[in-house]
Image (cartoon, rainbow, N blue to C red):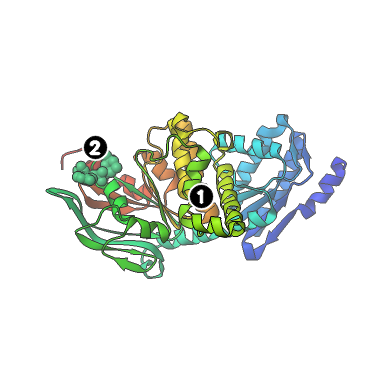
Amino acid sequence: MTQLQQQTDFANRLTFHDSLQAAEVDFSRVTFSSKEQVDRIYDEIDQKLAATGQRWYFIVNYSDCVIEPEVWADFAARGKNSNINHSLGTVRIAASDKTRETIRERAKSDFFRSNIFDTREAAIAAVTNMRRHNEALKAHQQPGSGVNREAILRVDDVSLSFGGVHAIEGVSFQIERGEIFAIIGPNGAGKTSMLNVINGFYHPQRGTITFKGEKRVDMRPDLAAAQGIARTFQNVALFKGMSTLDNIMSGRVLKMKRGIFAQMLYWGPALREEIEHRKVVEDIIEFLEIQNIRKVPVGKLPYGLQKRVELGRALAMEPDLLLLDEPMAGMNMEEKEDMSRFILDVNNEFGTTIALIEHDMGVVMDISNFVVVLDHGVKISEGRPNEVQADPVVLRAYLGIAN
Ligand SMILES: Nc1ncnc2c1ncn2[C@@H]1O[C@H](COP(=O)(O)OP(=O)(O)OP(=O)(O)O)[C@@H](O)[C@H]1O
Ligand SMILES: [Mg+2]
């Protein structure tokens, strides 16, 4: 195809889908090889987007699209500019491994989520999820919209003590479906204890937990898991001698209907089930980009990767609510960025509600929608990350400034 044909064709390569609130950009089979060409195409796209007077979710098709290395910087700069001015979020379709890798690399350096899918259907499903998530978020951020909010979990007036130690005192909050919820606070504030109450490891002396509309004085860990709560731990809790693959597979145990007897009696169905579980596990391994360590015993892995495997095991439970206790503790900057991206992707692509404990305020600001602050077992503040960060009560708790 000549450049002229590409240019004239381009008019048909931007399609608006009003029902999805999406603008679909078709770069399939286009080769970007000069700055002029990149500018010409983006000028046209930007102009059309601006004319609509609204923002769109972008679906960008990169199937068999080639971006020559010399124009990558220009291409990325124009893409970023369009995103900033016109986008509500972007998903990408890419068939070739090479394009995928290039996009992933850019994503790493620019800290955007790569959101790459094999098929258009998967990309559209992801946009639908993104919209749902953003709507939920908007509802949460609207003052006075409390009645319409759908809480997946409510904690009401929970108190927990160990002998004389009051780990949690009269704490209440709610976690909305689809959000990323952060619990922060100084050491010993009661954060881990709170997660332990939510998934039934600890039984509070007072208060109630309401999960998916069902109210309880306490949870049982097995019930919590069966009902869709998965969890990772402050100190990695994996089977160190077992491979990555087997550790993640162990997260499927609850989902396995056919036990050892079924395997003996009717091994046909049991085998089919085993194959299905393997498929889920392999998908998770690919999603977390840990194919190269699938056979490695996790005890041999660096800490950052062990944390990622532990996330994989929790994901294998296909939870509705994922509890993460300091998922980035002990990680360097790059590992933290990777982990942040995976958490955002889990939330975006699977719509999983996430409650996490995190000490790094930068991370909390970047990825969470709502924050609760605990100090000495008491809730001292809550709100959007920027509100909480500026709250003098919170600053005082962290810095130990005298009143
Ligand atoms: N099983 C337990 N037995 C006795 N005391 C406990 C137990 N679990 C927690 N505590 C106490 O409860 C308080 C809160 O601990 P918790 O681990 O929940 O804090 P945290 O906010 O997670 O702290 P960190 O940031 O250090 O992880 C602490 O005083 C702790 O010593
Ligand atoms: Mg803790």
Question: Which residue is the extreme one toward the front?
Answer: 265
**Mark 1–mark 2 distance (CA, rounded to whole Å):** 33 Å
* Residue ID for mark 1: 346
Q: Is residue 221 visible?
A: yes
Mark 2, residues whose alpha carbon is within 10 Å: few (<14), some, or many (≥20)? Answer: few
* Residue ID for mark 2: 399
Q: Residue at x 67, y 57 (%)?
A: 121
Mark 1, residues whose alpha carbon is within 10 Å: few (<14), some, or many (≥20)? Answer: some
Q: How many marks?
A: 2
Q: Residue at x 35, y 68 (%)?
A: 214
Q: Quadrant of the N terminus?
A: top right
| Mark 1 within 8 Å of ligand 2, using the beta carbon | no
Q: Would you place residue 71 above or below residue 340 in this image?
A: above
Ligand 1 in which quarter: top left
Q: Residue at x 57, y 39 (%)?
A: 289
Residues 189 and 400: in front is: 189
Q: Position of residue 75 (x, y in %)?
A: 68, 38
The image's mark for residue 258 is none
Q: Position of residue 243 (x, y in %)?
A: 50, 37
Q: Is residue 189 visible?
A: no
Left or right placement of residue 231 versus residue 127 in this view: left
Q: Would you place residue 398 above or below residue 85 in this image?
A: above
Residues 349 and 5: in front is: 349
N-term-proximal mark, 1 vs 2? 1
Residues 271 and 340: in front is: 271
Q: Secondary structure at mark 2?
A: helix
Q: Amino acid at mark 2?
A: Leu
Q: Amino acid at mark 1?
A: Val
Depth check, mark 1 against mark 2: the one in front is: 1
Residues 147 and 101: in front is: 101
Q: Quadrant of the C terminus?
A: top left
